[in-house]
Structure formats: structure tokens, C-alpha cells
Image (cartoon, rainbow, N blue to C red):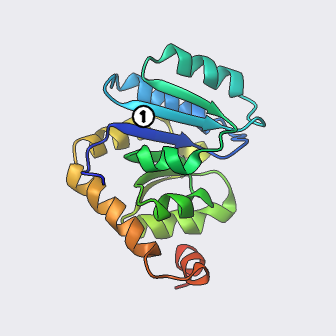
């Protein structure tokens, strides 16, 4: 049960994160100076910035680093907000009713991110090359200050999935519903 407060943020940009979005998100969160918010950061072994992400996490007293973890569902369930890519993990976040801030890191993610944003489930920051740390900071801060919006985002995520078959869910997320 979430109440719209953000006490735990889940950061995951896929197994490889070739564009370095995890580091961008960590720098944005760190600059907000929110020691009361725990940050769970997940990377895959293929992440070229894995060691730097791990160092940055260890330098943040409220960050927890995970590499190639098997407990993604548990981490998502415990989070109040996700920051990540606009791809297939969006479906998992919706199943968990987890509101998100997404960045598009591949062309096939654009329609999913746009559709979820139109439905009020995520904040779509857009194409990764155009997203600055300040953009993430501003959105995280705005959501920290708007519990009702965060609560509604989570409810909308669940309602997208609730009662839909897998095929209809995929179609809805691609904007073909």
C-alpha cells in the first residue's frame, strides 16, 4: 500500500544502460540532498559504468547497489517511485502499481513512454540525449511535493493492467488500444 509519499526510489535502466542514464539519475538524486529517501539502484553485469555506479552508491549513505539481482519484484514492491527506461520494464512497474519517471533510450520505447505519460502513469522526460540532470531533479522534486499525483499515477498503472490479458496490455502500451 502506497500513500503517495516518496520514501524509496527504484532506479533501473536495463541490464546494460549504454547511454549512462543510471549515473545521470544518481547525480540528480544526490544533488537534491534527500537523506530520508532510500535509493535502490540496479545494474546488470554488462553495464559499462557498473564500477562508477557502485562507487557513487557507496558514497551516498541512503543508496543501495545491486548488480544482476534476482529480487526485482521485491525491490519494485518496496519502492514509491521508479526512475528508468521507457521499455519493457514499464510493464513490470505497471503490474506493481509503481509510478515512474522514464527516459527513452531506444526508438522502440518512444510510443510506450508517450502512451503511459498520456495516461498519467509516468512522467516522460523524452529522448535520453535531451534529458539533463536538472530535468530529473525538477520532476523528482515536483513529485516529492505532490503526494496526490504520485498516488494517482500508481492507481492508473494498476488499472491499466487490472483485468487485461497480456496481449491487450501490450497493445495498450504501444498506443494501439
Q: Secondary structure at mark 1?
A: helix
When the figure is inspected, residue 15 is found, relative to residue 153, above or below; the finding is above
Which residue position holds label 1? Answer: 134
The residue under the point 34% across, 22% down is: 33
Residue 65: image quadrant is top right
Q: Identify the residue shown where x is 51% and y is 29%.
A: 26
Q: Position of residue 129 (x, y in %)?
A: 61, 44
Q: Position of residue 18 (x, y in %)?
A: 73, 40
Residue lying farthest to the right in this orientation: 46
Residue at the spot 33% in from the left edge and 25% down from the top edge: 34
Badge 1 density bin: few <14, some 14–19, many ≥20, Cα 10 Å = some
**Relative image position of residue 25 (x, y in whole percent):** 51, 35
Q: Find residue 166 and report its image quarter.
A: bottom right
As displayed, is residue 24 above or below residue 97? above
Q: Is residue 158 left or right of residue 169?
A: left
Identify which residue, 96 or 140, lies in the foreground. Answer: 96
Residue closer to the observer: 76 or 154: 76
Which residue is the extreme one toward the top?
59
Residue at the spot 35% in from the left edge and 68% down from the top edge? 156
Count of numbered badges drawn on the protein: 1
Q: Left or right? Give the position of 45 relative to 53.
A: right
* Vertical order, 53 against 78 (above or below): above
Q: Is residue 119 visible?
A: no
Residue 5, given in percent of the width and then of the height, sits at 26, 44
Q: Is residue 57 at all visible to an observer of this figure?
A: yes
The quadrant of the rendering that contains the N terminus is bottom left
Q: Which one is in front, 151 or 165?
A: 165
Amino acid at each position: 500500500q502506497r500513500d503517495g509519499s516518496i520514501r524509496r526510489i527504484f532506479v533501473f535502466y536495463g541490464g546494460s544502460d549504454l547511454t549512462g542514464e543510471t549515473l545521470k539519475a544518481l547525480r540528480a538524486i544526490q544533488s537534491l540532498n534527500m537523506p530520508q529517501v532510500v535509493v535502490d539502484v540496479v545494474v546488470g553485469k554488462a553495464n559499462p559504468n557498473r564500477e562508477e555506479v557502485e562507487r557513487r552508491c557507496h558514497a551516498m549513505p541512503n543508496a543501495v547497489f545491486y548488480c544482476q539481482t534476482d529480487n526485482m519484484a521485491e525491490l519494485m514492491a518496496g519502492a514509491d517511485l521508479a526512475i528508468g527506461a521507457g521499455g519493457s520494464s514499464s510493464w513490470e512497474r505497471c503490474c506493481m502499481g509503481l509510478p515512474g519517471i522514464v527516459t527513452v533510450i531506444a526508438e522502440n520505447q518512444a510510443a510506450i513512454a508517450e502512451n503511459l505519460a498520456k495516461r498519467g502513469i509516468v512522467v516522460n522526460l523524452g529522448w535520453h540525449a535531451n534529458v539533463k540532470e536538472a530535468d530529473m531533479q525538477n520532476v523528482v522534486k515536483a513529485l516529492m511535493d505532490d503526494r496526490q499525483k504520485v498516488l494517482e499515477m500508481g492507481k492508473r498503472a494498476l488499472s491499466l493492467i487490472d483485468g487485461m490479458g497480456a496481449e491487450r496490455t501490450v497493445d495498450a502500451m504501444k498506443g494501439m488500444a
